Amino acid sequence: MESEFLSTIALTFKLASITTVILLFIAIPLASFLVFSKMRFKSIIEAIVSMPLVLPPSVLGFYLLIAFTPSSAIGSFLGDHGIHLAFSFNGLVVGSVLFSLPFMVHPIQSALSQVPPSIFEAAYTLGKSKLTTMLRVILPTIRHGVISGIVLAFAHTVGEFGVILMIGGNIPGETRVASIAIYDEVESLNYDVAHQYALTLFVVTFAILLLVYTLNKKSLGAR
Amino acid sequence: MVAINLIKKLDTADGSIEAHFELELQEGEFITLFGASGAGKTTLLRMIAGLEKPQSGKIEVNGEVWFDSQKKIDIAPQKRKVGFVFQDYALFPTMSVKENLLFAAEDDEQRKNVASLIEMVELTSLENRLPHSLSGGQKQRVALARALVRQPKIILLDEPLSALDPTMRQKLQNELAFIHKKFGVTTLLVSHDVAETVKLSDRLAHVEAGKIVKICPPMEFFSHHTLSGKLQLIGEVLKIEEDFPITVVTLLVGSSVVKTIVTCKEAQEFQIGSQAIISSKAFNPILMPVR
């Protein structure tokens, strides 16, 4: 029992960590695109990014499940390359990345849009490439937005339920994360175990948020 | 020498116009672009820096072609050696004064020069401070020093002093003049300020609706050839008080306040905030040494 509890909690945070890291690499270019591109169809991409905010998780989970099934076009293509996403940890990562996307993109997007264009231009006229400007000038400037994005995406993935239930099911050690376990234990009237999971999530997420906001405040004060 | 001949569509409040800028700057010359807002002065600076693309034309700096629409040459802003000073300073907020300058440096020699540049703008004691803790004048000096780090071929100043109070503005004008004399870099300044223009520039280019309509020494431009006064001061109208049959006009000349009298009819030509010339014949002023 004890080891199952620990492995479930570990799996939950492993999923959240991997999701957050992948999101960080996707969200920064995506947010830059949303802020700076003058493309006509930008609104469509903006809408797609924000969809998970309003869409019931079960809808996203349902479509992902259908896409992942080996009998579907995408599923069979992936299967031919040895990738099986339905009811697997990798599938959960894909689902979580999509579902937490707006939570990472939005804070970075709003921080980026507040950087005056002259900051970019000043770096360019000083001979700095776009990449150098982004890494050395812009990212440090918008670090509060990036940190907010990381925290929100991480916390949101830890708390995710619907998508995971749809595409991951409830396989211990593979796809059984804490939020699913709580539901499962309550169903079986194991309130003690449910309590264990719930309290752990409660304390850990609170501690993370508290730490981040304290650090954030300190670095703001030092500015 | 810098030779510019550029055509660019400008969107102004009165619809779009086709701007055509033709300008030649001699090596080490200081030219001020003077004219109303929306005439295209800033756009011209941005095109020279490569931040905006002209429709057609050519930019040549000391024999190097930066832009040529016919030969399809368009050097990236990173490769053009300009020092651009922005109106809002554009300092990097997470870097200290020193780091802002060091970030611009490309080699050890330029890095070594940073300390003396900071000293020149009198910021050595503040070199480890972040930009947000500096005053407007200090920020502008950092921006200026930063623009000089790469030893640019041309310095572009986009209304660098417009956000400062008159005393600070005067101090920085002197500093700009000093720096220009010391480095001798070809400089193009955008300004609305008459005193600044007269004090700093070798020539003034009057920009109107996307065209440079006149280039001449600044004093010649402001005195309009019509006055034969021996003493001319340019000031800003602060107050107009009618006291029939005369009107007292109070002006700010440099940092001193001067009162003078005009007829009520003449007073109608002046507005508060506009620029005016006080002129006088040589025998009129009383000159005394300051003790």
Image (tube, grey):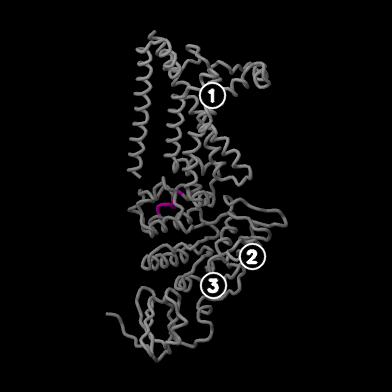
Residue placed most toward the observer, A20 or A130: A20
Type of the residue with mark 2:
Ala
> How many numbered callouts?
3
Residue A118 versus residue B62 in the image, above or below: above
Q: Is residue A65 visible?
A: yes
Q: CA distance from mark 1 to mark 2?
A: 57 Å
Query: Going by the picture, which residue comes out furthest to the left?
Result: B291
Q: Quadrant of the N terminus of chain B?
A: bottom right
Assess disc 1: are there few (<14), some (14-19) or many (≥20) residues with their C-alpha within 10 Å of its C-alpha: some
Type of the residue with mark 1:
Ser
Q: Secondary structure at mark 1?
A: helix
Instruction: Kindly identify the residue that appears in the image at 44 percent across and 15 percent down.
Output: A181
Q: Tell us which disc is closer to us: 1 or 2.
A: 1
Q: Position of residue B285 (x, y in %)?
A: 37, 88
Residue B19, label in figure = 2
Q: Quadrant of residue B231?
A: bottom left
Residue A195 versus residue B248 in the image, above or below: above
What span is in magenta?
B111-115
Q: CA distance from mark 3 to mark 2?
A: 18 Å
Instruction: Kindly identify the residue that appears in the image at 55 percent across and 33 percent down.
Output: A51
Q: Which residue bears the numbered disc 1?
A: A58
Type of the residue with mark 3:
Leu
Q: Which residue bears the numbered disc 3?
A: B204
Q: Tell us which disc is closer to us: 3 or 1.
A: 1
Q: Secondary structure at mark 2?
A: strand
